[in-house]
Image (cartoon, rainbow, N blue to C red):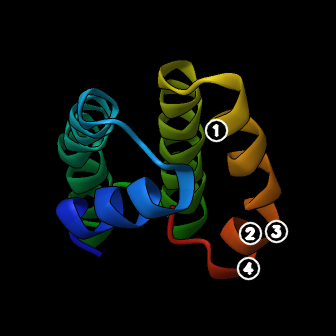
Amino acid sequence: MRIDHHVEVLSRLLDLTDQQKAAVTDVLDGTLPKREAVLIALRDDEISLEDALGDLMTLKDESIAAIRDILIEKQINRLEALKPLRMRFARW
């Protein structure tokens, strides 16, 4: 999923302000080099699939924590309500 689409979905679900959208975009953009490095290491057999998945889950958790810091309480509650869907689809 492209970052701009991801931000738009979050914006609709959480009713983000323009400032929050920009901040969420920055958070997600910041994860790209790390995610790419994990995938390259996996491709080059430098890490196992299990380690790569663990690293990617850590990045996801860090991203969600950073996004939570951007949100107000009402939005955090809504984000938490979406947790079962995040677990089901495991895309963000």
Q: Circle 4 is placed at which residue position?
A: 88
Which secondary structure lies at badge 1?
helix
Q: Amino acid at mark 3?
A: Pro
Q: Are marks 2 and 4 in contact (CB under 8 Å)?
A: yes
Type of residue at label 1? Gln
Q: Nearer the viewer, residue 46 or 72?
A: 72
Could you tell me if the residues under marks 4 and 3 are in contact, i.e. CB atoms within 8 Å?
yes
Indicate left or right for 62 with 36 as reference: right
Mark 3 — residue?
84
Pinpoint residue 65: horizontal percent, then vertical percent: 59, 29
Tell me the quarter of the picture where residue 17 sits: top left
Q: Residue at x 52, y 47 (%)?
A: 60
- Specify the label residue 87 is tagged with: 2
Sequence-wise first label, 4 or 1: 1
Left or right of 81 in this view: 57: left
State yes or no: discs 2 and 3 in contact (Cβ < 8 Å): yes
Q: Name the residue rendered at 54%, 61% in the picture.
A: 13
Crowd tier of the residue under label 4, counting other residues whose Cα lies within 10 Å: few below 14, some 14–19, many 20 or above:
few
Which of the two discs, 3 and 1, sits closer to the camera?
1
Label 3: how many Cα within 10 Å (few below 14, some 14–19, many 20+): few
C-alpha distance separating marks 4 and 1: 20 Å
Crowding at dot 1, Cα within 10 Å, few <14 / some 14-19 / many 20+, comes out as some
What amino acid does circle 4 point to?
Arg
Residue found at x 68% / y 48% = 79
Q: Secondary structure at mark 3?
A: helix
